[in-house]
Amino acid sequence: MNSAPIWDPRQYLRHSGHRARPFLDLLARIPDPAAPAAEGRPPRIADLGCGPGNVTALLADRWPTAEITGFDHSPEMLALAEKEHAGPTPGGGRLDFRAADAVDWTPDGPYDLIVSNAALQWVPGHAGSFARWTAALTPGGTFAFQVPGNHGAPSHTLLGTLCGRPEWRDRIGEHWRGSAHVLAPADYLERLTGLDCAAEVWETTYHQLLSGEDPVLDWVKGTTLRPVLTELGDDEEALGAFLGQYRDLLREAYPPGPRGTVFPFRRIFAVATKPVL
């Protein structure tokens, strides 16, 4: 099995509107950092797991003068982010993108905001990094993230069942679970308040109306299915057979309605703010 999935930013962005909505809801709960205003400087912001940069650019809308750096380990994602979004922003700030893996990312200095959107679910033991990340926050700075909480949904449980079938078990097995490293909301709250941060954690289920043929399959091709697509990508016959079987399971679990296919999606949010000294 390949050690890391190959990402397709164009496929990911096919549902960019629905994917950006949780980030906008998270952004609305993030307070303005205290230190930049007190010190007369622009905010310094890190976006951990920035992907193609489309939501990183939303940070510049909220803080026009900010110096914002998006970090990601996918060359494909970074290439598109740099092409579409890097450079000076209209408000006088700047957007930059760098290669880094959230598994071992260490802040290179103080940040006023560290944010992560739908990325930490790919990082085993990510809560163990919270202390390192919050320690890098300026007084009044914030660490905020959202992760999918839908690993008990049919889109995931059916994928697990399929990967466990005899014809796929040895080829794929449990490796598809690379995006399932998510804690319960109460666990995140305990971790963050234990770091002396003022924290709030909540969850929301978005009942998304998707359009097109087999839209749930199209959705997971951009995220959850990436490890499987990466593993089977060089074997067109096997890939076609797997996708056909998974498609049939998803069609039964998510039948289309007269106006589209309803795809419930649970998300977990956390905002932790460091005290002002």
Image (tube, rainbow, N blue to C red):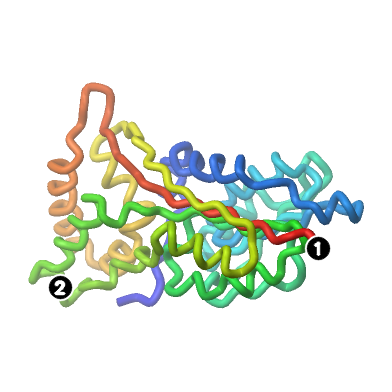
From the viewer's side, name the closer residue of 256 and 24.
Answer: 24
- Mark 2 neighbour class, 10 Å CA radius: few under 14, some 14 to 19, many 20 or more: some
Q: State whether residue 91 appears in this view.
A: yes
Residue at 14% across, 58% down: 241
Q: Disc 2 and disc 1: Cα gap in Å? A: 54 Å
- Provide residue 49's location: percent of width, then percent of height: 55, 61
Mark 2 or mark 1, which is nearer to you?
1
- Of the image marks 2 and 1, the number of the one nearer the N terminus: 2
Residue at 17% across, 59% down: 242
203 with respect to 163 (left or right): right
- Residue on which the image places disc 2: 169
**Which mark, residue 238?**
none
**Amino acid type at image mark 2:** Arg
The answer to whether residue 248 is left or right of residue 99 is left
| In-image side of 54 versus 162 (left or right) | right
When asked about the image quadrant of residue 166, the answer is bottom left
Dot 1 lies on which element? loop
Q: 148 above or below 3?
A: above
Between 157 and 60, the one nearer to me in the picture: 157
Q: Nearest the camera: 135 or 77?
A: 135
Q: Nearer the viewer, residue 126 or 15?
A: 126
**Residue at image mark 1:** 277
Classed neighbour count for the residue bearing mark 1: other residues with Cα under 10 Å, few (<14), some (14–19), many (≥20): few
Q: Are marks 2 and 1 in contact (CB under 8 Å)?
A: no
